Image (cartoon, rainbow, N blue to C red):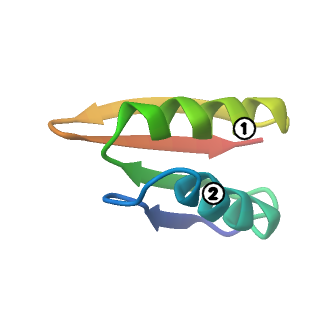
């Protein structure tokens, strides 16, 4: 099991989604945590992950969001 942390803050869509997709392809049974700073990125990543069969938990931390994604 491996965990990955992706810092996609300051990046415009679709780049955070692509970064998330690449991380999920290599995580196995681990967890991917994605940090973003835009609600649009949160919604796009969440939609992609759920449609790909993953569970997503979103936490808001001041100005940033942390999405925890796992099978």
Determine the residue positioned at 59% across, 52% down: 14
**CB atoms at circles 1 and 2 under 8 Å apart?**
yes
Instruction: Determine whether, in the image, residue 9 is placed left or right of residue 12.
Output: left
Up-down relation of residue 47 to residue 18 (above or below): above
Up-down relation of residue 18 to residue 36 (above or below): below
Mark sitting earlier along the chain (1/2) = 2
Please tell me whether mark 2 sits on a helix, a strand or a loop: helix
10 Å crowding of disc 1: few (<14), some (14-19), many (20+) = some
Where residue 48 sits: x, y (%)?
A: 72, 38
Where residue 57 sits: x, y (%)?
A: 52, 30
Determine the residue positioned at 34% across, 39% down: 38
Up-down relation of residue 60 to residue 25 (above or below): above
Where residue 50 sits: x, y (%)?
A: 74, 30
Please tell me whether mark 1 sits on a helix, a strand or a loop: helix
Q: Nearer the viewer, residue 62 or 30?
A: 62
Where residue 65 sits: x, y (%)?
A: 34, 40
Which residue carries the number 1 mark? 48
Up-down relation of residue 2 to residue 66 (above or below): below
Which residue carries the number 2 mark? 20
Determine the residue positioned at 39% across, 53% down: 35
Q: CA distance from mark 1 to mark 2?
A: 9 Å
Q: Dividing the image into 4 quarters, which one contains the N terminus? A: bottom right
């Amino acid at each position: 099991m491996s965990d990955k942390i992706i810092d996609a803050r300051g990046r415009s869509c679709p780049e955070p989604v692509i970064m998330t997709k690449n991380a999920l392809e290599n995580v196995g049974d681990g967890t991917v945590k994605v940090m973003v700073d835009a609600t649009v990125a949160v919604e796009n990543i969440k939609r992609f992950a759920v449609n790909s069969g993953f569970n997503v938990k979103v936490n808001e931390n001041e100005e940033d969001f942390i999405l925890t994604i796992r099978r």
